[in-house]
Amino acid sequence: PYSLKLTLDGKEYTRDLTYSTIQWDSSQWTGADALTLDITGVDGIARGVVKEDPDRCSGDAENCLVGVVMSGWSGLDTGAEYPARMPFADFTVEAVLMEGNDVAIDYPTITVTNTVATWDSNGGLFGSGSGYWGDYGSEFAMGGSVFDANFGKYVPKDEFDSAGDYGCYSFTITVSQEGSNPLTDTSYYEYSTSNSNDIWASVSSC
């Protein structure tokens, strides 16, 4: 159990924090959860970068998929949509975008220690190679080699390891901590086209 011990004017006061309610960002949880370093919530999303780009759009496409931005959330599961940040937790992250059974993007392993995240940028193909995860929030954008003012750094489709064809894609993020079982989240996306416009839409499964 967790407790707070305070000495005031020579007198010692102790309070059990295990069942104390902690309020933060419209979520609340007990003191035991707030003080733990164990990741309990993981989420991920792959956002399609669809826009006009004469250099990357082919044929009669007006708006085409030029790449994706992959983001992950890791922290304390409070029952909210996304986990709360855990700035003192150490963990590693694996993230993979699949095109059917083929690997489209195998993002380098991200190591996080006290909010400092590091990974192999592979010469700038995967962002800067360093950042902060859990400093101001639990979300972390996995940058690519191309910058867009609206999307940030994304991984362009022409750098996919797969064909990049229309069809169903899956994005899996796995968070691991020493001594604990890995936590995984998988989301699915349908890449299609309609009236010369590419569509990247979240779906329940492939």
Image (spheres, grey):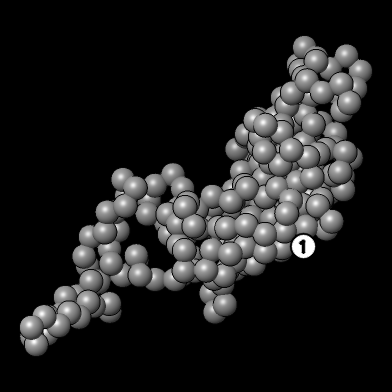
Left-right relation of 93 to 35: right
| Residue at x 73% of width, y 54% of height | 128
Instruction: List the single residue furthest toward the front.
Output: 9
For residue 90, side relative to residue 164 (left or right): left
Task: Work out whether 163 lies above or below 108.
Answer: above
Q: Estimate the x, y position of residue 85 in percent, counting from the top left.
A: 45, 57
Q: Nearer the viewer, residue 75 or 126?
A: 126
Can residue 66 be spotted in the picture?
Answer: yes
Which x, y percent locates residue 78?
37, 54
The x, y position of residue 83, in whole percent, is: 45, 53
Query: Does residue 46 lie above or below 52 as drawn?
Result: below
**Residue at the farthest bottom position:** 10
For disc 1, the marked residue is 120
Count of residue discs = 1
In the rendered image, the vertical position of residue 195 relative to residue 25, given as above or below: above
Give the quadrant of residue 145: top right
Q: Residue at x 83, y 58 (%)?
A: 122
In the picture shown, does residue 22 fall above or below 169? below
